[in-house]
Image: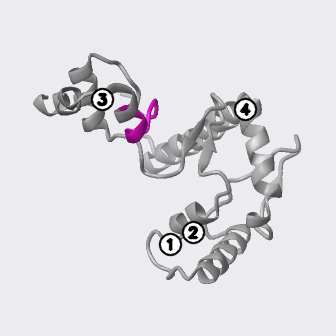
Amino acid sequence: MFFYTFNAVKVRKNIFIFAVILTNFIITMAMSKVEYHPNYDRYVEMITAHPNYNGLYYERKQDGRVKWVVASKSKNWLKRLAWWDDVCRRLGITIQKDCYAKAARAIHPTGKHVCQCCGKGKSIFYEYPTRPTLKRLNMAFGLELEQTDYTISEFVTKFCKTWDSWTKWRKY
């Protein structure tokens, strides 16, 4: 009788190694095929050249594009963190949860972020309807809007011409 024995630890280790290799391959392929919208490229260059971001650490990739992402807790991440801490201090923002988001909104020159895929500018502020609100608005007005199609004030201006139309969405 033949009994095949296997080492479970060795099998798990090989599966882990395969998963890491596959993940790295997928990430590499995904990153190499990304084509950024020209508006996004212009936006990134505007941000890096703007005086509000003077001293912010960033690198450039081989293709010349700005490399925004840095590994957490890395040397480069610590450089950026120190820069953001300094920005917060200059603006009088206490270093605590959400302080960097507040500082980023305060120094942003346009108040709009440009999508790297479609090239459209979208607000950096919380002014778009939440998903549940958007669902109710779409049902009430017979629309099929996406979350960032209109800010709340733009929606009201465009679709709520009368009091009846303004209160219409509450029924849903």
Q: Is residue 11 above or below residue 91?
A: above
Mark toward the start of the polypeptide (4 vs 1) = 4
Numbered circle sitting on residue 160: 3
Q: Is residue 90 above or below residue 58?
A: below
Query: Label 3 vs label 1: CA separation?
Result: 35 Å
Q: Position of residue 156 (x, y in %)?
A: 34, 34
Residue type at mark 2: give it. Ala
Q: Residues within 10 Å of mark 1 (few under 14, many from 20)?
A: some
| Secondary element type, mark 3 | loop
- Tell me where residue 87 sits by quadrant: bottom right
Question: For mark 1, what is the residue?
Answer: 99
Give the vertical position of 82 relative to 48 (above or below).
Answer: below
Which of 161/47 is in front?
161
Mark found first going from the N terminus, 2 or 3: 2
- Do residues under tags 1 and 2 come within 8 Å of each other at their CB atoms? yes
x and y percentages locating residue 142 in the rendered image: 27, 16
Tell me the residue that label 2 is attached to: 103
**Res. 12 visible in picture:** yes
Colour theme: one colour
Question: Viewer-nearest of labels 3 and 1?
Answer: 3
Amino acid on which disc 4 is placed: Tyr
- Residue displayed at 64% across by 73% down: 84
Q: Earlier in the sequence, mark 3 or mark 4?
A: 4
What residue range appears in magenta? 148-155
